[in-house]
């Protein structure tokens, strides 16, 4: 006698629980791999009401794309933290945030940083605790265009969705940073044509403005968001990164923030 | 300009000073490296002030008039009164338009 196959799969993203409903075992397997940090054990439910996400799309890439888009937007909007559109990596317990709107290269830079030794925090959101300003991990699958996959030397890796690939930190040879940390650096991305990467100090107030401008959910607790943005930036250094090649730029960030790499 | 309130009118006909401020009650004001970010719950808008605007805001207590503020900034930057008066008045107007001054809200 065989046990019935369960198609229940729940993920908990920033306190929001989503229950996947699909008849396709392959899609379930992909979600299980890509959203592994967020899986809710069926025997240990969070108690939060789950939002059902039914995936009826014709192809596996479409189903995955739907799932990725739906749960990300809903989770960030409802997050109990101050969430800012940003790529975030970490080293030695220090977080480096790269706030930017979609399509400006933050996921590519995040992936490049992972290829160069940083740990993964998020390619989508800088999540700051309202309690103590800690940076909280939100390691959703990293979404890269085919160009970006090639640019960070990860061709052939990842799971295809519509027009892009979803990758884990492990796919990029890195690992997740799983503990809350503090924001040490805020890097404003300034992508240019054919430029040798350079890192310039920026006035910190511009970092406060950027965090507020790019926040997903500051409107829920606006007074707290303004105070938190100022507090966090007061303890960080704000930079502007001029770059063309993401891997060269990631090298510069590593040597600037962490130190010279040991010679082989 | 809309942001000033008139001082108590004395019994003479000299020009009445235009006092700037004070801030409306209930603002969330934070300062990083000398620059203010202000959230106004009435408009639900956050305003970022640069260094010069922050100096103007710091003097917007309701105790200084526009000339006082222009003089303070002229001294700070080593510029003439006329060189910065227009900018100061424009900045005060912007702060007023954001509803950050108490008197502005009643006009």
Image: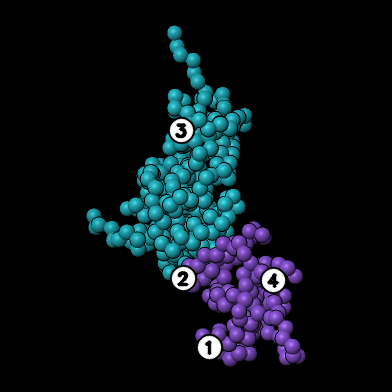
Chain colours: A cyan, B purple
Does residue B41 appear in the picture of this structure? yes
Under circle 1, the secondary element is helix
Quadrant of the frame with the C terminus of chain A: bottom left
Q: Chain of mark 1?
A: B
Residue matched to label 3: A39
In this rendering, the label closer to the viewer, 4 or 2: 4
* Mark 4 burial class by Cα count in 10 Å: few <14, some 14-19, many 20+: many
Q: Residue A96, how many percent across, how many down?
A: 41, 56
Quick one: label 1 or label 4, which is nearer the N terminus? 1
Under circle 2, the secondary element is loop
Residue matched to label 4: B103
Quadrant of the frame with the N terminus of chain A: top left
- Considering only vertical position in the picture, is A237 above or below A28? below
* Label ID, residue B75: 1
Q: Residue A187, how many percent across, how many down?
A: 45, 61
- The image quadrant that residue B27 belongs to is bottom right
Measure how far apart labels 1 and 4 are at the Cα level. 27 Å
Label pair 1/4, CB-CB below 8 angstroms: no
Q: Residue at x 49, y 36 (%)?
A: A12
Measure how far apart labels 2 and 3 are at the Cα level. 42 Å
Residue matched to label 2: B33
- Considering only vertical position in the picture, is B32 above or below A174? below
In this rendering, the label closer to the viewer, 1 or 4: 4
Q: Chain of mark 2?
A: B
Evaluate whether label 1 is on the same chain as label 4.
Answer: yes
Measure how far apart labels 2 and 1 are at the Cα level. 21 Å
Quick one: label 2 or label 1, which is nearer the N terminus? 2
């Amino acid at each position: 006698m065989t046990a019935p196959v369960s198609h229940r799969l729940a993920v908990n993203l920033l306190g929001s629980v989503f229950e996947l409903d699909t008849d396709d075992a392959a899609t379930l397997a992909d979600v299980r791999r890509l959203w592994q940090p967020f899986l809710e054990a069926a025997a240990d439910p969070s108690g939060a009401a789950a939002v059902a996400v039914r995936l009826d799309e014709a192809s596996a890439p479409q189903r995955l794309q739907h799932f990725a888009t739906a749960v990300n937007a809903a989770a960030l909007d409802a997050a109990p933290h101050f969430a800012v559109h940003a790529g975030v990596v970490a080293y030695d317990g220090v977080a480096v945030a790269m706030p930017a709107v979609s399509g400006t290269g933050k996921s590519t830079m995040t992936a490049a940083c992972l290829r160069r030794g940083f740990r993964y925090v998020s390619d989508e959101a800088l999540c700051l605790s309202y309690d103590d300003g800690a940076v909280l991990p939100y390691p959703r699958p990293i979404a890269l265009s085919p160009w970006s996959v090639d640019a960070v030397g990860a061709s052939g890796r990842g799971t295809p969705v519509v027009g892009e690939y979803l990758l884990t930190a492990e796919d990029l040879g890195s690992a997740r940073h799983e503990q809350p940390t503090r924001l040490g650096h805020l890097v404003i991305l300034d992508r240019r044509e054919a430029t040798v990467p350079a890192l310039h100090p920026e006035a910190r107030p511009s970092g406060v403005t950027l965090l507020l401008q790019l926040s997903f959910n500051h409107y829920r607790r606006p007074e707290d968001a303004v105070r938190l943005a100022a507090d966090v930036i007061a303890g960080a250094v704000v930079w502007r990164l001029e770059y063309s090649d993401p891997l060269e730029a990631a090298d510069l960030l590593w040597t600037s923030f962490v130190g010279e790499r040991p010679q082989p | 300009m809309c942001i000033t309130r008139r001082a108590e009118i004395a019994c003479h006909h000299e020009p009445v000073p235009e006092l700037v401020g004070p801030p409306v009650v209930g603002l969330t004001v934070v300062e990083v490296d000398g620059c203010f970010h202000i959230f106004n719950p009435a408009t639900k808008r956050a305003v970022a002030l640069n260094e010069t605007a922050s100096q103007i805001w710091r003097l917007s207590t309701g105790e200084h008039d526009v000339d006082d503020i222009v003089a303070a900034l002229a001294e700070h930057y080593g510029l003439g009164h006329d060189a910065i008066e227009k900018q100061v008045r424009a900045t005060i107007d912007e702060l007023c338009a954001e509803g950050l001054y108490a008197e502005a809200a009643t006009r």
